[in-house]
Amino acid sequence: MCAQPAVGLGITLSVLAESESAAAALVVPSAPVGEHTSIEDVLAFAEHCDVVTFDHEHVPADVLAALVDSGVSVHPRPDALVYAQDKLAMRRRLTELGVPCPAWAEVRDEGELEAFGAEHGWPVVLKTPRGGYDGKGVRVIGSAAEARDWPLADGLLVEEAVPFSRELAVLVARSPMGQCAVWPVVETVQTDGICTEVLAPAPGLPDDLAAAASQAALTIAGALDVTGVMAVELFEVPVGDESDSGTTGFVVNELAMRPHNSGHWTIDGAVTSQFEQHLRAVLDLPLGDPRSRDRWTVMGNVLGGEYPELYPTYRHLMARDPAMKFHHYGKDVRPGRKIGHVNVGGDDLDDLRERARHATQFLQGVITE
Ligand code: ADP
């Protein structure tokens, strides 16, 4: 999705593609095929690049080190990226920075897990520090025995089960010269562990909470020397006792250092999209305005479903809702896989949500009218 803004900015993109039919290879003319885990492939690819950046966080540390050693300009730099790759490293650093986090610990055996549960209450949330996405690598457990089939000896992250009222995300961009831009805080709605809807801005979010969340994202971006776009995923939590009912705060769930699903609304809903901003940031160009274009923007994720033929459904939806924007990734359709999204903006949030929900369900084949 960086391809479109790259055209506008006059930047030539090249993508290291996993296959000739990879979604990015279909839209980026220079798409050599190679493995992101191979030092040889990545170095050969980088030889022709001014700057190398990422659309996922799974490039191994030795590949990143080889890139840096060979003098390639890499953004975000490996020293920052590690906090998006390793949830234990992220918890340690954010705690040092004083950023609100759930109670957490590193555990290596059942005894340590038992002790954490006894102190913070069961159930707890157990996470593999690396390699998780869309809820994979996260498990809610009611006792230490339930973790027996997980590699405790490797060191796992355990967290209190946060009684959150909803999930939020703040997207920030930072350039090597230190310029930052923050988009409005959004609400992310999850269904079965997968984000299905994003509401921008988060409805009913108190101004002071939005400001504190934005400030936390700026603090993290600066302290970690992040370059490019970073998403900070948050849980909104009740604070204080019954008498402060309605007062909320936040704790950070995790970081992503790349354009992120919680920012797909910005393509149509913000003056500068996260994809354009990421290019500007990694190239150390002045950043664009992150403000919203509409009072509300709703993003609906299209998940793979029973309807492999997407184009006939487009005709119906385009005719039904000419103001709706479609983004189709050209990926193979697999149940539950994010294969596209829709954006719709305006003044009536309920109406926008209804239209986005109708479109995504129709595209998935959940409804046929
Ligand atoms: P992933 O890396 O797969 O995105 P996350 O750490 O974001 O994993 O966790 C996936 C989901 O699990 C979150 O969106 C949230 O709904 C739930 N979750 C994660 N951590 C906690 C926690 N400490 N307390 C309660 N729910 C949590």
Image (tube, grey):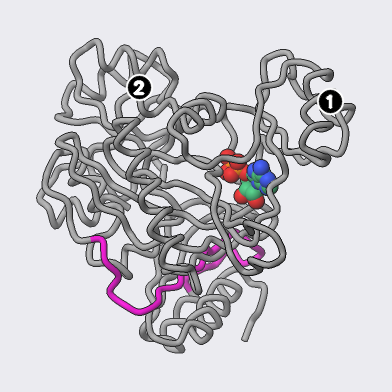
Q: Nearer the viewer, mark 2 or mark 1?
A: 1
Q: Which of disc 1 and disc 2 is earlier in sequence?
A: 2
Residue 344 within the segment the image draws in magenta: no
Q: From the viewer's perspective, is 128 left or right of 266?
A: right
Give residue 201's quadrant in the image: bottom left
State which region is magenta: 290-311
Q: How many marks?
A: 2
Q: Position of residue 358 (x, y in %)?
A: 57, 80
Q: Is residue 30 left or right of residue 220?
A: left
Residue placed under numbered mark 2 in the picture = 79
Q: Position of residue 56 (x, y in %)?
A: 43, 37
Q: Secondary structure at mark 1?
A: helix
Query: How far across and down, in percent of the image, does residue 16 sit?
Result: 33, 32
Q: Amino acid at mark 1?
A: Glu
Residue where numbered disc 1 is placed: 114
Q: Name the one closer to the observer, 106 or 136.
A: 106
In what element is the residue under mark 2?
A: helix
